[in-house]
Structure formats: C-alpha cells, structure tokens
Image (tube, helix red, strand yellow):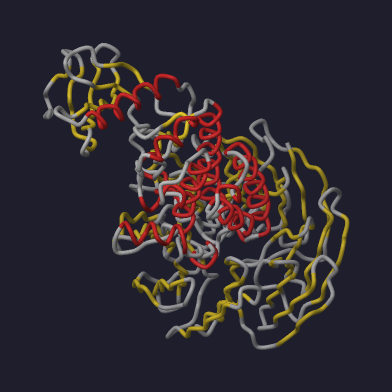
Amino acid sequence: MFNPGDVIDERYEVTGVLGQGGMAHVFHVRDPILERDAAVKVLRPHLTEADSGRFRREIRALAQLNHPGVVSIFDLGRSDLVYFVMELVAGGMVTDLGPLEGDTEALTRLLDAAIEIADTLGYIHRLGMVHRDLTPRNILLTSSGRPKVMDFGLVLLAETSKSLTRTGLTLGTPHYMAPEQAIGQATGFQVDLYAFGAVLYKMVTGSTPFDADNDQAVLYHHVYTELTPARELNPETPEDLERLLGRLLAKTPESRPTSAYAVADTLRSIRYKALSAKASEPLGGPSRLGVYPEGPAATLGLSKRWAAKLASGPQWPSGLSVGEGFLLVGQRGDSVTSLWPPDGSVHLEIATSDEVHLPPLVHRRQLYIASRDGGFQVHGWPEGNAVLSQEGSNLAGMLPYGLGIVFAISDGRIEYQSPAEGRAWKVALPSGVTAPPIAHRGTLLVTTDDGWLYCLDALSGKERLRVKVGTMRAAPTAHRGVVLLAERDGALHAFNLDSHEVLWTYDLGGDLWASPAAWRGLVFATSWDKDLRCLAHKTGDDVWACTLPGAVTGTPVVADGILYLTTESGHLLGFDARSGEALFEEQVSASPIQASPLVAAGRVYVASLDGTVTAFEA
C-alpha cells in the first residue's frame, strides 16, 4: 500500500511497516509538523461493509477513551483514505515481560504492568465497553515498559453485544477467547477478564492456558478442559497469583472476579506480599541481582539507629539475612544470632558445630544453617526449636526456588526438595561446586571448580547446556536473560542464555570475590584492586567508575536507586546508582566487613568481622 519514503495525506512520512492484516495496514511514520514518530493504521480498500464497520468502530472507540493505559489517537484521515494516526508503541508485547521470575525487579515489572492493564480494563468497562479481543498483540509496551491496550476493532457497547452474538458473530483470538465467546453466547465484560487471565497466564508461565493443532481444538479446551495450575509450569508463581489466575480463567462468567478494578486491587495485594517475601531470600531473589524491594530515602545520607556488639561477625561467604521479622547473623564464632530489628536486642542464639559458612536461610518458617565443617541444622522459626542436625552435608549453597530449596553440595551433587509440592530431583556433576547456585528463567546455574557453568532445567535437573569459563569464586548473577560470570582473575563475562553467546567481556584488573549486582540495565562490579565500575548491561561499556577506600568481598546491593557496598576497610558507602554520585561514607568499624549490606524495612544493616552489627536509616 505504502513504501518507505511515501507521504500520507501530504504530511506523514512513511519510514517502515509495523504490521498488516486482512483489514488494515499499520505504518511507522514521521510527523514533520510536530516532529514526532507515530503509527498510522490505514483501512484496506475494497473491504466488506462488516470490516469497514469494525474499523470505524475502532476509531470511534479510541476517540472516546482518555486513559494512560489506552493508546492515544492523534489524528483522523481527511482524504479518500480511511485511516487514523495513533501513538507509536514500540516496546514489544506485554508477554515479553515473562515468564515470571522470583527476583525483585522482574516481579515488580510484571505485576506493575498487570495492575495497569486491569485498571485500564476497569476504565473501559465503566464506560460500557467490552474489548472482546484482548491478546498479547493488542497489549504493547512503551519504551519505558508501560502497557498500552490497543486494537479496538471488536469493541462493543455492553448492551449491544447480546444481539450481535446471537447472529452467529464469533470473533476473537482462539488462545485468549472465553468459553461463552467461543460457543457464541452472550458476552459481557467477563470475556475481557478471561482474556486478561489468559494473557497473564502466558506472562507468568511462558505458555498459553490451552494449545492444540487447530483453532477448533483450542476452543474446545477453553470450554471443557481443566486448567493446568500455573505453579506446575513455573514454581516461582506466588500462590495467591495462581489462585487469581484460576478465578480469571473460570469456565463460567459468574465465577470470575466481580470487576477489573477488583482484579487490580488483588494484584496490588499480591505484589506487596511477593516483594515483602524477597527480603528473606539471598540478595533479593534466585538470580542474586543484589536488588531489594525497599530501602531508606537516603539521598541525603544515613544516620545510625543502633549498634550491637556480638562475639563475632560473618566471614565470607556467610552474611546477614532476615526471617519472620528478625535479623539473623551467621557468625564465624560458631553460632547464629537473631536480633530484634527495632533496637538490636538479642532474640535468640543458636550454637553451631563450626563457623557459619553461608548466610542463614529462613524459608517457609524453617531456619537452615550450614557450617564450614559440613554440619547442617534445621530449626523451626522464629521459635528456634531443633528439627534436624547432621554432619557431612558440606553445602556450597542453598537457594529457595518456588516452595522448595535447591541444595548444592561441595562434591558436585545438586538436589531440589519441595515436600509441599511433592517434587524432588537429584543430579551429580563431574566436579565440585564453587559457589551458591542461582536460578533464572527456569534455568538453574551452577559453577564448578574446574571452570564450567552448568545450566540445568530447574523443574527436572536435566542438563540444558554447559559452558567453559574459568575459575570462579563469586556466584553468578543473571539479569534479563544474561548471566554475569566473574572469573577469579578479574574477567567479567556477559553470557546470553538464549543465543549461547558471550556478549562482552570486561577486565576489572584485580581479583573478583564479589558477585556483580544488576539493576535496570546497569551492572555494578568491584575488584580487589578497590575499583567500582558501573557498566551498561547490553554492551559492557563504562557508565561511571570510582576508587573505593578498601577492597570489596561482599556483593553490592541496590535499593530505591541507591547502590550500597561495604569494604575490607570497614566502610559503608552509598552511591546514586544511575550517576555514581557519592551520597555517604561511614566508617562502621576498624574491622573488615566481608558480608553484603542487607536492606530491609527501610533500614540498612551492616555486620563486621569483629561482631559489630549496625542499623542505619535515613
């Protein structure tokens, strides 16, 4: 219809084709008058009256809508062409945000988008409209990641949909079509809730609720087949979210939520609970991004809230954690001490057989402790009652995943145990494990002492891929499909899990003991040579850098846009994560600090080797 270089209506310069279908073409255009890019949707000539009616109905529907979640209409055709100009939404489909990961940033992006879509549907329904064709292709992301609902060609006023469906009009997209829509019954706003449930199910699990060889078979499954629970496909799905998906995808309209606004409110509650739970997981989630969901408003600095003196503090790779509202310190002095966060008073002390080798882990009201001599203890939490004690476990890492835990044993054994789901597997790698494993996009990532990265299916333990890297002591970090691998000698590699390619390598010069942190397209890496580097995640290019007062052993962490790190010289430092501006520097102790800072409930907690534990707040 149009080619790049053509001009529509003596104004819009065509720069490319965005899409085409049986009814219309969509072009990427440049508006020279307003100096902005836009999208033009042009009706194909010689269409049936019904198709033309759908196109004009889309124009009228968009003209009535004024909501940040709906694509904006800029202009209407004034010539023989039937077209309209709309906002350019070029960030991809909303399902690109999934599958759901258990890390803070990924959870936030996906659930925030879901809340915005539900609120948008509430607005549309309040005006008496039903979209009737909600699919991932009709919910696109802006460049900043915000969802926009579009393609209103099938929108109907709620009061007219009954008469139109009685005539046999069954339009929509089979993989996202409600049962009543599939069999031609009357359709109300509940069909949009079902379609949204199907879109959200794909966002969360990576799969549509039902699939088959042809459209009719897909529709049959929507009407008659029971839904596979989301957790069976993605254990990282919060239990409350799985229940909501079941309600949205209920077979009968009356079994679904009462409104899209009610869905948005439920999603807000799920988001709050899910992000609160991240505080008890190592470095904010299974990908160990070093990102925490909330921190103090510390742009103007931090002040000391309290300081406690224990017999000893954490030695790398042990550290701090939280569980059921208590701060836990894994000490080199053969104990775990639980502190009451408001004032630092001791809640409980649990003796161990040797120094605590890993950060204490609280998962589903149980405390897991690993000692350097191979001892392993389990206690009920927060009561502290002993549940299990054994020797010879030799754990190199513990990773919460779904309702279970991945245990990595130093000799190369990897075990997943999830009694609540009745799921377990074991594998044996050819060599020993050097660092705690991580999980990212359904893949378990394990480094071994002979320099290999093993990629295992997180549901079964089956090997997907192995990559030769080099000797690593720091655990990997995974961010947006890319694994960051820190070699002991200072080389940092970015490995793409999909393409199996090394995207870039950066030489930090000094030994790497600390895992990198990753946040919003930025990577933060520190070396033993006291260098702090902020790199672009996609390219490895320098963004900013500085020299630190001491070497860094613990992973830097990010909360509310502030990068926190501790040093072997006993300092706590804070930087604006985007710009590198130094915000504060505090000499916490004369003793080295080898544990990562912990950010929880609006405070920053730091523990030095000599047992000084300090809480800071804005």
Q: In front here: 491 or 235?
A: 235
User: Which quadrant would the N terminus be assigned to in this image?
Assistant: top left
Residue shown at 31% from the left, 24% from the top: 56
Question: Would you place residue 140 above or below residue 479 in this image?
Answer: above
Which quadrant holds residue 269? top right
In the picture, measured across the screen, residue 591 lies left or right of residue 15, that is: right
Residue 556 seen in render: no
Residue shown at 24% from the left, 35% from the top: 18
Residue shown at 34% from the left, 72% from the top: 468
Total marks shown come to 0
Q: In front here: 378 or 615?
A: 378
Q: In front here: 397 or 281?
A: 281
In the picture, measured across the screen, residue 337 lies left or right of residue 36, that is: right
Which quadrant holds residue 236? bottom right
Residue 418 seen in render: yes
Q: In front here: 160 or 399?
A: 160
In the picture, measured across the screen, residue 50 lies left or right of residue 195, that is: left
Question: Would you place residue 280 above or below residue 53 in this image?
Answer: below
Position in image of residue 424 (x %, y %): 56, 80
Position in image of residue 388 (x %, y %): 76, 82
Position in image of residue 319 (x %, y %): 67, 63
